[in-house]
Amino acid sequence: MLFQLDWLPLAVKIVSTAAVVIAASMASERAGPFWGALFSTLPVYAGPSYVMLSIERGSHFVADSALEAFAMLSASGLFLLTLCRTSPRLNRFASLAVALAVWIASAWAIHSFAWTALSATVLNLAVYLVCFALTIRPWRESFAAIAVPRHWYDLPLRAGAVAVMVIGVVGASSVIGASATGIGTMFPISLAVLTIVVHSRLGGRAMSLVAASALRTIIGLGLAVLCLSLAAPAWGSTAALIAALFCSLAWTGGVITWRVRVGRAAAA
């Protein structure tokens, strides 16, 4: 039941998810869809989950969960591809419903297999190379800012929507039970809420551009959980978490550097 939840983890998830969605939606409005996607795929939601897991369960459980999460990254790629293709054609709820259905179906299929780091890497390479090829055009269009009117109630409304959705998801998982911790940590809750916000504020085309960019920026999260799964048994949870954070930040820094160079070349 909802009142039986451990409220500290729930509060952390609400705050972290709300911060990501608000920052990502504001970045999408003021700087462009690329920057919104960058914020939305930072490991702000998964990170605290793994810190709590390391305290409660130990390094080997963390490693197994992170490996499952890495395999689930391919489901996130299909989720984003679906959003990219359907957002311009469907309303916000329909496009999100289709994308979530794709995520659930692919997550179920992925969870049916026993993955190694190598086989999960091959799976992700195959999925993301196809996704990249199918989203080249919106990816190239995702750098321009989109003008939108702003109101005083925008931020509190977004924070409230995030809180309600996180409570609902976590409360449901406490009742029905999670089939795998790795699946739960990769559930695209931040992206789901961001879809509603961006689609409502900026339109389906803008959400398509955010999804195309997120396909590129989410790789940092994948590298983080892969590093965590490989390093936790040998180094322990604390060192592995630090290394995973470094992998995520290194990818994010590389993507930002590339984006800045592209912007300067276009302006020249």
Image (spheres, helix red, strand yellow):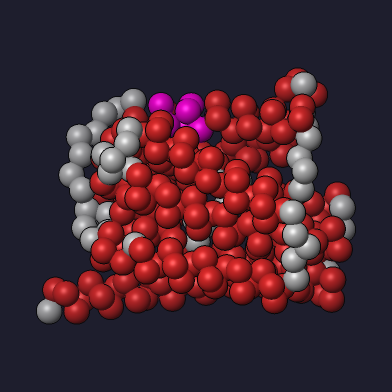
Question: Quick check: can you spot residue 246?
Answer: no
Task: In this rendered view, identify the residue nearer to me: 153 or 98.
Answer: 98
In the image as oriented, which residue stretches furthest toward the left? 268
- Residue for point 75% across, 59% down: 113
Left or right, 11 with respect to 32, comes to right
Task: In this rendered view, identify the residue nearer to me: 189 or 116.
Answer: 116
Quarter of the figure with the N terminus? top right
Locate residue 71, reporting x and y percent.
66, 62
- Residue for point 51% across, 33% down: 162
The image quarter containing residue 94 is top left
> Magenta stretch mostly in which secondary structure?
helix
Question: Quick check: can you spot residue 159?
Answer: yes
Vertical side of 66 occupied by 93: above or below:
above
Vertical side of 164 occupied by 21: above or below:
below
Q: How many marks?
A: 0
- As for residue 158 lying within the magenta part, the answer is yes
Residues in magenta, as a range: 157-163
Quarter of the figure with the C terminus? bottom left
- As for residue 238 lying within the magenta part, the answer is no
